[in-house]
Amino acid sequence: MPAVASRGGRGRRRSVNEINMVPFIDVMLVLLIIFMVTAPLITTGVVDLPSVGKSQQRPSAVVEIVVGSDETLKLRLIDGSKAGEPDAVKLPQLVARVREAQDGKAEVPVVISADRNVKYESVVRVMDTLQRAGVQRVGLSVKQGA
């Protein structure tokens, strides 16, 4: 039977223009509960980078490899407070020159300093070359502060 409303004694009928909102509200409440339960379970893709602090004790000697903006390599030995002149070196000779600068002391760290505009791939290539050759202490140089 259609929903109709009659008026008094007239023979004309008019349809009801009201929408039942109860099912709509029920569906919205169920969806709201589902989102409230699942939202804390979703993990975001944020990368939490480590902060750089000051080291407790500086090593007495450091072998520094400088990767220039044109991807050239320079090697220098920093011994105490004095630093040697940087010498240009090619990637194939890098391991031999690092071992020579370490002078048989494997505990002497190797620090890679790279220009901001250098491709990440170039820095990783230098680090990978040293690690494959068995150089123990390889690190990256960073700027202190913000």
Image (cartoon, rainbow, N blue to C red):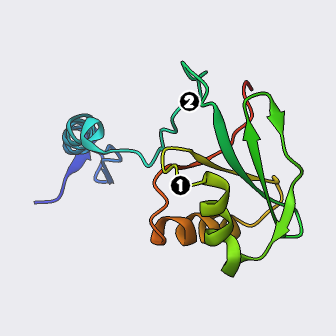
Q: Nearer the viewer, residue 84 or 103?
A: 103
In the rendered image, residue 90, in percent from the top left (x then y), is placed at 77, 76
In the rendered image, residue 139, in percent from the top left (x then y), is placed at 57, 48
Q: Residue at x 49, y 44 (%)?
A: 107
For the residues labelled 1 and 2, the Cα–Cα distance comes to: 32 Å
Q: Residue at x 48, y 51 (%)?
A: 106
Q: Say how many tags the image has.
A: 2
Q: Residue at x 53, y 55 (%)?
A: 104
Visible residue check, residue 20: no
Please, what is the three-letter code of the amino acid marked with disc 1?
A: Gly
Q: On the image, which quarter does residue 19 sit in?
A: top left
Tag 1 residue: 104
Q: Is residue 131 above or below residue 63?
A: below
Tag 2 residue: 51
State left or right for residue 33 relative to residue 54: left
Give the secondary structure at mark 2: loop
Placement of the N terminus among the 4 image quadrants = bottom left
Q: Residues within 10 Å of mark 2 (few under 14, many from 20)?
A: few
Q: Residue furthest bottom?
A: 92
Give the secondary structure at mark 1: loop
